[in-house]
């Protein structure tokens, strides 16, 4: 625990959006079976921060909800802000939750930090963002981001390219620059699935990832999530032929980070949530496993390397 410097937390499993490839729903229509709507208790976060003596950064993100949907988001933020050792706080959001005044107040609340940064996940322009970010409002996102940046906030525009928005990358970049975003980042290969469903009607959608080099993974996804390896981990077949993982590819080892879910369970990273590899459930030492070249299928699938 001494070498951990970065804590990725799941403040909540709530969200207002219905992104088709998000783990909180089924293809964008209806909640994932068994998902409980809950917020990470502040006491749990406080206890966890104390457990890591060299912790420097907290990332409010997660894989089941939007941090800004947490009912106790202000208390969670105050908890993070109250520790002198925490120098960086990152908040990742679709941007269409909460009011502009809330965003405008953030820079002042985090002014003692080295870096407070809000990542706005905006996959397109007014015409296309809602196609993947179903249920969000472009006008509200723009209002919130403008309020935050106008108050001196550091904002990053995160753009996932799909077939339906690939021609808007430059336009979105231009909007980000005119609004004063400090960074614009393309997240390529981030959503390899296809299809999706309309969040209200369940009608099939035709969402496809976009690949700069035009090389797409095989279309056949019949094995996704259907098989288990000898450790009982669900095997996600992403069509890769990876046989090893580089330490530099592993965010857990590279960033010295761990992931805390909304139930207060700790994992090496959010990918290993799927494999039920929490520290409490499993004896797990990723560094040791890598040294023995004993890679988990999840590691090979998500972070593996072929050369
Ligand atoms: S905004 Fe985030 S948490 Fe909400 S549905 Fe989309 S990906 Fe999932
Ligand atoms: S899945 Fe494995 S290799 Fe990837 S970040 Fe997690 S621990 Fe590291």
Image: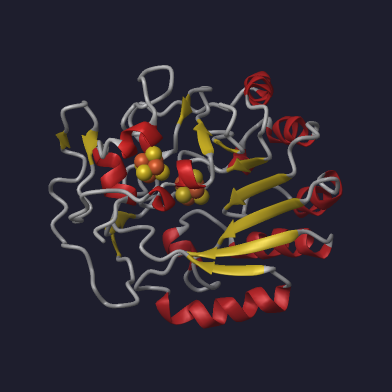
Q: Is residue 224 left or right of residue 248?
A: left
Residue 304 percent location from the top left of the image? 29, 51
Q: Is residue 24 visible?
A: no
In the picture, the quarter occupied by the N terminus is top right
Q: Is residue 114 visible?
A: yes
Rendering quarter of residue 205: bottom left
27 w.r.t. 195: above or below: above
**Camera-side residue of 162 and 305:** 305
In the picture, the quarter occupied by the C terminus is bottom left
- At 21% from the left and 26% from the top, the residue drawn is 232
Residue 247 percent location from the top left of the image? 40, 48
In this view, which residue lies farthest toward the front?
Answer: 291
Residue 166 percent location from the top left of the image? 41, 77
Q: How many marks?
A: 0
86 w.r.t. 203: above or below: above
**Camera-side residue of 234 and 6:** 6
- At 40% from the left and 66% from the top, the residue drawn is 188
Q: Is residue 50 left or right of residue 151?
A: left
- At 50% from the left and 30% from the top, the residue drawn is 261
127 w.r.t. 16: above or below: below
Residue 19 percent location from the top left of the image? 42, 52
């Amino acid at each position: 625990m001494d070498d951990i410097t970065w804590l990725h937390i799941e403040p909540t499993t709530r969200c207002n959006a219905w992104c088709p490839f998000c783990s909180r729903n089924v293809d964008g229509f209806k909640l994932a079976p068994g998902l409980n709507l809950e917020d990470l208790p502040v006491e749990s976060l406080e206890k966890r921060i104390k457990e890591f003596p060299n912790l420097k950064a907290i990332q409010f993100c997660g894989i089941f909800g939007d941090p800004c949907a947490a009912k106790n988001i202000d208390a969670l933020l105050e908890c993070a802000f109250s520790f002198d050792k925490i120098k960086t706080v990152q908040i990742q959001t679709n941007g269409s939750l909460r009011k502009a005044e809330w965003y405008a107040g953030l820079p002042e609340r985090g002014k003692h930090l080295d870096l407070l940064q809000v990542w706005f996940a905006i996959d397109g322009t007014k015409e296309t963002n809602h196609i993947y970010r179903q249920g969000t409002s472009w006008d509200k996102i723009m209002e919130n981001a403008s309020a935050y940046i106008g108050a001196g906030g550091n904002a990053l525009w995160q753009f996932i390219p799909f077939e339906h928005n690939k021609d808007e990358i430059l336009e979105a970049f231009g909007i980000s620059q005119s609004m004063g975003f400090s960074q614009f980042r393309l997240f390529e290969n981030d959503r390899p699935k296809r299809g999706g469903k309309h969040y209200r009607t369940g009608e099939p959608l035709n969402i496809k990832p976009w690949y700069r080099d035009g090389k797409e993974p095989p279309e056949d996804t019949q094995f996704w999530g259907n098989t288990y390896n000898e450790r009982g981990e669900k095997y996600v077949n992403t069509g890769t032929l990876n046989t090893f993982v580089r330490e530099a590819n592993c965010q857990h080892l590279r960033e010295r980070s761990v992931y805390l879910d909304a139930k207060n369970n700790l994992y090496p990273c959010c990918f290993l949530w799927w494999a039920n590899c929490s520290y409490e459930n499993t004896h797990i030492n990723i560094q040791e496993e890598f040294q023995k070249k004993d890679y988990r299928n999840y590691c090979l699938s998500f972070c593996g390397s072929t050369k």
